[in-house]
Amino acid sequence: MRSIVRCFCVMLLNIAVQNAEAKNIKVALGMGRPPYIYLEQGQLKGIEVEVIGEVFRRLGYKATFETLSPLRLDAEARHGNSYDAVVGVARGNERSIFYSEPYMHFENYVVALKKKNYKIKSVRELAPLKVGTWVNAWNGLGKSFKAQFGPQLSGGYAPNYFEFLNQEDQCLALFKEKVDAIVIDKYVFAWLRMTLAEKEDTEQEVDVFRLFNGESPSHVAFRDKKLLHRFDEELAKFRLSGEYDRVVRSYVGGNLASYFKPKVTRYR
């Protein structure tokens, strides 16, 4: 009996030690990208929040999340030192910054109202249209898009290219016909189409064009190379366990997928 009690006490002591040893880690995230990152009753939720938080928890850290604007997020990833990790950035070439393996892949499409009857075969055919994207989208959608909509020699952008800090505003701009087409991840569009129905007629039929090859990867930027390697190893284990897919499914069910209207127009 004493040995059982002793073992139980040792187990409790180990748990207490583990909890006491959990270190806080400051993590910066983007904002306004449901179902990946969003606020619900003041609480930060979403696929990215759960995935990143769980990987750090398994590494013995308690993640403290802060949301930043897209411009500040990019600046923190490349030049700042206020955070231990910056989530949701494109891979750069800086020598002092270390980028994780992709923790998430976004599947981006061009979406336009069906009544416009556009037949968009390539990025070049977006040239006469008013196109709405998220901030810095031009840098992550391939060479053709970058050449068409990236910064011009004058330092500005093409007059028909519009970046939105909040993807809710981007989606509303489409249905209010302030832009002709938007470039957006399929699940972000589906989520916003479903949740914005009270503000605008988001049930309008749309055409969806797949102009971008493959999926857009997103990375976590670290300054500590050892922490990067540990993160990548734990992320791989998290995927293999099936828990990664469970988190995604908990946010992306059949109801949400139906709002994407997955019939995609492909031109080759």
Image: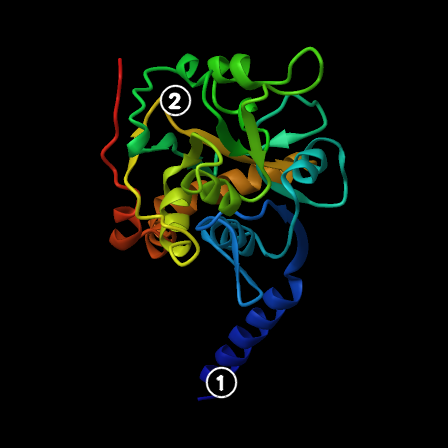
Report the side of 154 relative to 107 (left or right): right
Residue at x 47% of width, y 48% of height: 36
SS class, disc 2: loop
Q: Which residue is mark 2?
A: 212
Q: Quadrant of residue 159?
A: top right
Counting from the top left corner in percent of width and height, residue 216 is at 45, 29
Residue 197, can we see it?
yes
Residue at x 47% of width, y 32% of height: 179
Q: Is residue 188 above or below residue 149?
A: below
SS class, disc 1: helix
Query: Quick one: 138 or 178, which is closer to the camera?
Result: 178
Query: Which amino acid is tagged 1?
Result: Val
Give the class, few, some or many, for how many residues have Cα within 10 Å of label 2's Cα (few <14, many ≥20).
some
Counting from the top left corner in percent of width and height, residue 177 is at 44, 37
> Of all residues shown, which one is farthest toward the left?
263
Query: Which amino acid is tagged 2?
Result: Phe
Q: Which residue is mark 1?
A: 5
Which quadrant is the N terminus positioned in? Answer: bottom left
Tag count? 2
Counting from the top left corner in percent of width and height, residue 258 is at 25, 48
Counting from the top left corner in percent of width and height, residue 231 is at 55, 42
- Per the model, the C-alpha gap separating discs 1 and 2 is 62 Å
Say whether disc 1 or disc 2 marks the residue closer to the N-terminus. 1
Residue 101, can we see it?
no
Q: Quadrant of residue 261?
A: top left
Report the side of 111 relative to 130 (left or right): left
Report the side of 131 relative to 30 (left or right): left
